[in-house]
């Protein structure tokens, strides 16, 4: 059989992120059992087609016109997975009834923070996702949000995994607190500067995005802004840090949380989105109320004071997430849909 993955970006896109990582990890494992094609928007300097880890990547159009290319391409494949990583669905189900909507998170509240005047239009378009008949959600939180959005169809929850060969414990440095991710307003990277105030630990802030120039203007003596970092450096940062902090307004799945845990690093996070599904109090970190900076500081101090115990239990908790297991769940769902 053959499978089409539709996503705005592909693994080699300069701004590839969590959604692309999910599709690559799942797709390369599925490619051992079936033909897998990945349709994404064109990238200057990259070929129109190439093979990546057994997946045929096709690059067509741009952010807007990719939606038209997806309708043409979806007709040619047995099963389609539309990766709805942005608010606007691809609507491949209009031309192929064996289409699955893969929902990373529901954007309704995020759009108010990120989309300005376009927010009402994008919210309306996102609500059209209820036209799909088949769904995969990456967390129970996303599943609940889809139901609130009006989805009546059955929703399969398949957790993301983690690469334990890549993300593994390493030597710890001095007590250090890490924030890493895209510099988007809804992820609240600016909160780091307020949280760090009055604490003696070093804070490292890593990532790139629209808030970078604003962050570079800020000055807190114990906060060091690293900008974008390589994959190898990201792993080293996870390994050396004693705490990862997560400050997002919402996360469909806390990818950085599981990656940090896999490196033996506990997490202190705002209790938003799917994060309470992942963070087990006193095992792989602690949760605090959204925007409760005082509680965040106290939880960081508590986490660092527990040191080695939390390093070990965080790693143990990360073993619950495995890409091979996740990919097998995708394979089971896709093959069952192909037989219908």
Image (cartoon, grey):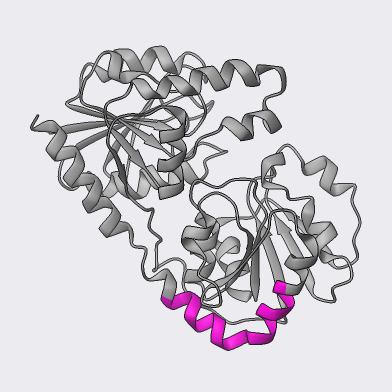
When asked about the image quadrant of residue 294, the answer is: bottom right
Is residue 139 among the parts visible in the rendering? no
Is residue 66 among the parts visible in the rendering? yes
Q: Is residue 278 above or below residue 213?
A: below
When asked about the image quadrant of residue 103, the answer is: top left
**Where in the figure is residue 11, as x and y percent of width and height?**
44, 41
**Outermost residue, left direction?**
339
**Where in the figure is residue 324, as x and y percent of width and height?**
27, 58
Please tell me whether residue 300 belongs to the stretch shown in magenta.
yes
Please tell me whether residue 331 belongs to the stretch shown in magenta.
no
Q: Which residue: 46% across, 29% down?
A: 149
Q: Is residue 114 above or below residue 69?
A: below
Q: Is residue 53 left or right of residue 259?
A: left
The magenta-colored residue range is 299-316
Frontmost residue, 173 versus 254: 254
When asked about the image quadrant of residue 271, the answer is: bottom right
Rendered-image quadrant of the C terminus:
top left
Frontmost residue, 204 versus 148: 148
Q: Which residue: 50% across, 46% down?
A: 252
Q: Is residue 163 left or right of residue 107?
A: left
Rendered-image quadrant of the N terminus:
top left
Q: Which residue: 23% across, 50% down?
A: 329
**Where in the figure is residue 258, as x and y percent of width and height?**
48, 63
């Amino acid at each position: 059989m053959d499978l089409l993955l539709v996503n705005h970006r592909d693994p080699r896109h300069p701004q590839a992120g969590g959604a692309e990582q999910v599709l690559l990890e799942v797709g390369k494992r599925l490619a051992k059992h079936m033909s897998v094609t990945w349709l994404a928007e064109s990238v200057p300097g990259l070929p129109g087609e190439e093979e990546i880890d057994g997946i045929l990547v096709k690059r067509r159009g741009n952010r807007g016109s990719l939606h038209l290319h997806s309708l043409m391409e979806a007709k040619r494949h047995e099963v389609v997975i539309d990766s709805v990583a942005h608010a606007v669905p691809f609507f491949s189900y209009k031309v192929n009834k064996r289409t699955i909507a893969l929902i990373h998170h529901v954007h309704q509240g995020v759009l108010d923070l990120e989309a300005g005047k376009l927010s009402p239009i994008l919210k309306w378009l996102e609500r059209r996702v209820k036209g799909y008949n088949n769904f995969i959600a990456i967390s129970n939180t996303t599943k609940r949000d889809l139901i609130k959005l009006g989805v009546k169809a059955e929703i399969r929850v398949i957790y993301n995994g983690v690469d334990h060969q890549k993300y593994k414990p390493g030597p710890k440095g001095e007590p250090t607190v890490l924030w890493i991710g895209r510099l988007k307003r809804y992820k609240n990277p600016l909160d780091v500067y307020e949280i760090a105030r009055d604490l003696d630990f070093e804070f490292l802030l890593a990532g790139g995005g629209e808030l970078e120039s604003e962050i570079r203007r800020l000055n807190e003596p114990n906060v060091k802004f690293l900008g974008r970092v390589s994959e190898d450096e990201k792993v080293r940062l996870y390994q050396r840090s004693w705490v990862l902090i997560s400050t997002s307004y919402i996360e469909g799945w806390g990818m950085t949380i599981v990656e940090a845990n896999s490196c033996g690093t506990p997490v202190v996070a705002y209790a938003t989105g799917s994060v309470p599904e992942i963070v087990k109090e006193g095992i792989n970190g602690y949760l605090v109320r959204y925007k409760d900076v005082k509680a965040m500081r106290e939880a960081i101090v508590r986490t660092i004071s527990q040191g080695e115990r939390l390093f070990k239990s965080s790693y143990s908790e990360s073993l619950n997430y495995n890409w091979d297991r996740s990919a097998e769940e995708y394979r089971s769902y896709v093959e069952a849909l192909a037989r219908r």
